[in-house]
Image (spheres, rainbow, N blue to C red):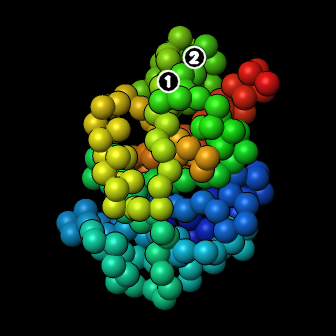
Amino acid sequence: MEIAETLVEIGRNFYGRGWVLGTSGNFSAVTSREPLRLAITASGVDKGDLAASQILEIDQEGRVIAGEGKPSDETKLHLTVVRTRGANAVLHTHSVWSTILSLKNDGSLEIEGFEMLKGLSGVRTHEHVERLPIIDNSQDMTALSRMVAETLEKNPEAHGFLLRGHGLYTWGASLSEARRHVEIFEFLLEATGRMKS
């Protein structure tokens, strides 16, 4: 499956950049809309050594329909973003800067004035203000997915969100757009963090 190979390449690339160390992070991509199917990384796998066999296919309820293993613990969040945003890919990283800034800000993090903002879909000027909502983390994925849905509905312009003490979620109309959004956000988060420190 071409999508699986792309997710493997993304995992290795992000691991090399320090954004998904250990077994952190998870990635998904829509393989079918009707019925809804996602390719998603298996739980507990090292993204630096990710293999295509560790990419599972799940249905709209998060049940595995192809592959062996357990899907990411955060599968419900991926499904929520896909449904709420109409995204075709969802990528989640655990970088140092996304974690630090999620703990140092309340409610949201506003980023403005950077030329790199123009790498986000639909943004045409560095004067854009990107508001990254910050959602309190929880191990209750049903409750957390409800909070994600509510937050995204209240922030229709947001290109991503932070889970407090956890990391970044972003998405795109394609895997390449979602990957670009991660790269843009990780640059913006590091630049913002360094300026504030």
Left or right for 15, reference 121:
right
- Report crowding for label 2: few under 14, some 14 to 19, many 20 or more residues within 10 A (C-alpha): some
Q: In the image, what residue occupies the spot 28% across and 36% down?
A: 153
Q: Position of residue 71 (x, y in %)?
A: 46, 75
Q: Position of residue 37 (x, y in %)?
A: 31, 69
Indicate whether 66 appears above or below 189: below
Report if residue 5 is visible in the image.
Answer: yes
Viewer-proximal residue, 97 or 171? 97
Give me the disc on residue 112.
2
Q: Amino acid at mark 2?
A: Glu
Q: In the image, what residue occupies the spot 48% across and 88% down?
A: 68
Indicate whether 124 appears above or below 30: above
State if disc 1 and disc 2 touch (CB < 8 Å). yes
Q: Secondary structure at mark 1?
A: strand
Indicate whether 157 appears above or below 175: above
Left or right for 51, reference 71:
right
Q: Position of residue 40 (x, y in %)?
A: 47, 69
Q: In the image, what residue occupies the spot 72% across and 33% down?
A: 190
Q: Secondary structure at mark 2?
A: strand
Quarter of the picture holding the C terminus? top right
Q: Position of residue 165 (x, y in %)?
A: 61, 46
Give me the disc on residue 62.
none
Task: State which quadrant residue 182 falls in.
Answer: top right
Q: Amino acid at mark 1?
A: Glu
Give me the disc on residue 130.
1
Q: Residue furthest left?
A: 34
Spatial CA distance of label 2 from label 1 is 6 Å
Q: Residue furthest bottom?
A: 68
